Amino acid sequence: MREILALTARPGVISFAGGLPAGELFDGAGLSAAFADALRDAARTLQYSTTEGDPDLRAAIAARLTGRGLATAADDVLVCSGSQQALTLAATVLIEPGDVVLVEEPSYLAALQAFSLAGARVVPVACDEDGLDPDAVAAAAAGGARLLYTIPTFHNPTGRTLPLERRRALAAVAERHGLWLIEDDPYGELRYRGEPLPSLATVPGAEDRTLYLSTLSKVAAPGLRIGWVRTPAPLRSSLVVAKQAADLHSSTIDQAAAARWLAAVDLDAHIAHLRAEYGARRDALVAGLADALPPGSVHNRPDGGMFVWARLPDGWDAEVMLRRALERDVAFVPGFPFFAGPPDRAALRFSFTAHPPDEIAEGLARLRASWH
Ligand code: PMP
């Protein structure tokens, strides 16, 4: 996967490959002011600090989650170096070698890697257009499983969203089988259509067994490396110890600047702007994709997030198609690396956030020319 992304990063390539937010939409001025302000208190903001995180940042995150319907106290929030670190910490704390971790098929590659590195046996669970099938989770859990990792809203790589009824059924399955749930939600605020759905962590049966992960990466900037886990009380101290052992704490200055940025920015307005821009980019990709892919291909139309999932006709290989696309300076990601089980070689993922609609149209024209 890393080799593929390296190829797609060549100058001049219109890339639908990496899941990059649009750099021109970062609030550079606001973040610059926040860093300058934080550095005026350098004796504190350049010092070592507590493992749990900057108190103002934890409070701001808790307030945001509470406002979105997930009642959270600042003490429930462990600030991490990206939500990626929260995945590693959760794996460290929850997994003994040989434990079964259930995952969506396909799923987020770097989470699969974190679980495998912790010694887990990663077991894929079949999904359909609505995501996980709770009955399939129950069947997979029957043999004994430690936890389920899920991205229920605007999934990576498929863009799918788990409907409310399935959230309820999944919580009941988790309760019945004593499963921990990791709800990974980096994309939930990037909704372009429809109404928000409740977090799994609020659904009866799942409240006390869900580690809810999110991040500033998609709504502010990924270079900040600020994410968090909302921890069930029994796991709090072991997660803090794991974080302490990993890196003592996340960058003091970055956290202080993020807290100041959150205090100063109109976050709803900023996210509304991202939604409008990204929604238009999604529309541009979805409108042109059928024409840009070989006849008989299919793709979905996600309600939010950053990704569209597509499938070439039987017999086509997405990796071969990528090599031809790169000759025309356009790129996407083949789907096979996202599978924990036997991969679908015809699947592919398109990210629509990094280019404005006119460049998306040009990229799709190049893609069509690459196989036509
Ligand atoms: N989870 C998912 C599903 C993701 O797609 C990503 C980023 N691509 C992450 C976690 C990690 O994000 P970050 O560490 O930047 O918060």
Image (tube, rainbow, N blue to C red):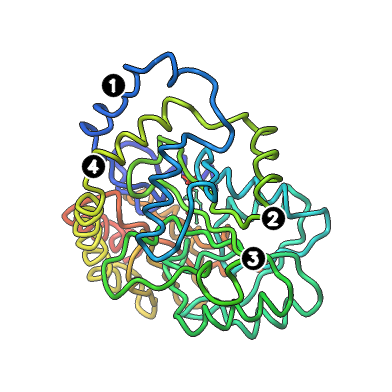
Residue type, numbered disc 1: Ala
Residue bearing the label numbered 1: 36
Residue type, numbered disc 4: Val
Q: Are marks 4 and 3 in contact (CB under 8 Å)?
A: no
Residue bearing the label numbered 4: 265
Residue extending furthest toward the left: 358
SS class, disc 1: helix
Residue bearing the label numbered 2: 234
Disc 4 and disc 3: Cα gap in Å?
Answer: 33 Å
Residue bearing the label numbered 3: 209
Camera-side mark, 4 or 2: 2
Q: Position of residue 129 (x, y in %)?
A: 46, 80
Disc 1 and disc 2: Cα gap in Å?
Answer: 38 Å
On whether ligand 1 comes within 8 Å of the CB at mark 1, the answer is no
The mark that comes first in sequence, 4 or 2, is 2
The mark that comes first in sequence, 1 or 2, is 1
Q: Position of residue 285 (x, y in %)?
A: 26, 64
How packed mark 3 is, by other alpha carbons closer than 10 Å (few <14, some 14-19, many 20 or more), is many
